[in-house]
Image (cartoon, helix red, strand yellow):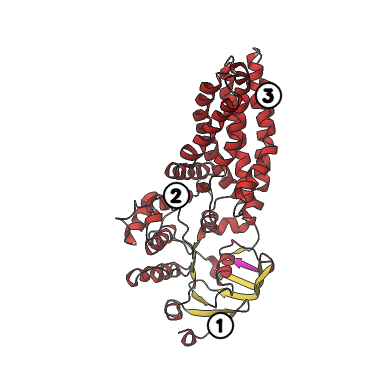
Amino acid sequence: MTAQAATTPSPWRQCVELARKDLRLELRTGEVLLVTAPFGAVALLFVPLAIGPDTPLLRQLGPGMFWVVVLLFGVLVTLRQSAADGPAQLAVLRLCGVHPGVRLAGRALANAMLLLTFQAVLAPVAIALYNPDLTGGLWLIPAMVLVAAGLAALGTVAGALAEGLAGRTILGPLLVVPVALPLLLGATQVLATARHEQAPWPWLLLMLAAIGVIALTVALVARFLEESA
Amino acid sequence: MADPVAGGHPAARLTGVDVEIERVPVLRGLDLTVAAGERLGVLGANGTGKTTLLRVLATLVAPSAGHGEVLGARLGTPACAAIAPRIALIAHEPALYPKLSLRENLHFVARLTGISPTAADDALDRVGLARAADRRAEVCSQGMRRRAELARVLFSTPSLLLLDEAHAGLDAASAGLVEAAAEQVCRRGGASVAVAHDHQRLAAMSDRVVEITAGRAVAMPREMAV
């Protein structure tokens, strides 16, 4: 038998390994890029079709529609089936010495990367369909990063809470959407404020504070979530 | 390798342990000691709590009453997290990610535990999966998946090996891998606990056999088990 001297990796190293595994699973299943993202694009397309060619109204609605679609479909990204660990896999992770908080952090890291990709795919579609005023558009970058981080953390908790429940995808949005409102509000106001040539720091700080609260909640409930899974 | 169960203490000791799963009592007042170096076999009808017993020994389920120690850690305390990496469980359901290859699955576990992925490759070779290592777990037979899990045991060198119907899906040639893994863990001073329905095989690979009846462990003479 191979006697390997194991040195327990740092929680960060474990977190990265877990995220890498989740991203590899996503690459194999294509749930986000091949299923959810096209549906998000279709949702963006439906509004102009329903409203008609009223360009000023579409220009005005565009940023808000983008964030609503990101928020609603982003929940599905975080709750994707390919990322769900079964009881046997959870047992192995625990026996590998992975702390429940680290497991959730790994999942959240992978979710954040996927949500950033999801937004990067949808943003050009929204620009093409709605032709919004992109004055101060660079502020979108931190807003997208913060939305990805916040939604990733929130979706991870919701996924852990709903793990093993038949109503996983129903419960997810119900848990996530109300708590995600500060993110939605912040994200929509960032561009609106930047358009008036003002720095949208208060909105970015609001989003940052929301993420802080969510992350703290994850850290506090991680052990409970693991034991109830 | 250092003695896995230090100080001559038993690998596990359960005293008056009750376990409820979804408010249904599964184990009731169970007493059980697994000595260091011992290979214990566990028999029992379906639903008697054999798998639950393994999960208790794996520190995955805390008793609702009674107390126990596994590898020196008291069950239900934070100390269990520290000894968890010294326990290997081969559960009835394979713990592999179906979309990952056998090699990717094992490398993942190796990296999480700080073991070189090369050791995982060697272990795959030893269980005869070197040529199938890059095949996704979802397209492998149950026997191949089982062998991949045994490879995980080989490179993680546990002090307590828990086997839940580990022979399921294995052909006669591969079945010996289970016995060999248990034997090697025990030779290093660890212990193994195996649950199986095949009485004869279980008796052959165990130093002692107990039967779980009405939530309790009852010693069973080897000849009766056979």
Task: Find residue B208 and name its label.
Answer: none
Q: Identify the image quadrant of residue A188.
A: top right
Is the residue at mark 2 from the same chain as the one at mark 3?
no
The quadrant of the picture occupied by the C terminus of chain A is bottom right
Q: Nearer the viewer, residue B153 or A63?
A: A63
**Type of amino acid at the residue the image marks with label 2:** Phe
Give me the residue at 63% from left, 19% from top: A57
Q: Is residue B69 visible?
A: yes
Q: Nearer the viewer, mark 2 or mark 3?
A: 3
**Type of amino acid at the residue the image marks with label 1:** Ala
Disc 3 from disc 1: Cα separation:
68 Å
Are the residues flagged by discs 1 and 2 in contact, CB closer than 8 Å? no
Chain letter of mark 2 equals B
Q: Which residue was labeled with disc 2?
A: B108
Q: Secondary structure at mark 2?
A: helix
Chain letter of mark 3 equals A
Q: Earlier in the sequence, mark 1 or mark 2?
A: 2
Q: Nearer the viewer, residue B171 or A59?
A: A59
Q: Secondary structure at mark 3?
A: helix
Give the percent coordinates (x, y) of residue A127: 53, 21
Does A11 appear above or below A166?
Answer: above
Residue B117 as seen in the image, left or right of residue B55: left
Does B169 appear above or below B199?
Answer: above
Residue A113 as seen in the image, left or right of residue A166: left
Q: Based on the picture, tell me whether residue B167 belongs to the magenta stretch.
A: no
Q: Identify the image quadrant of residue B25.
A: bottom right
Give the percent coordinates (x, y) of residue B2: 46, 61
Is the residue at mark 1 from the same chain as the one at mark 2?
yes
Q: Which residue was labeled with disc 3?
A: A203
Q: Which residue was labeled with disc 1?
A: B219
Give the residues in magenta: B58-69
Return the residue found at the far left: B131
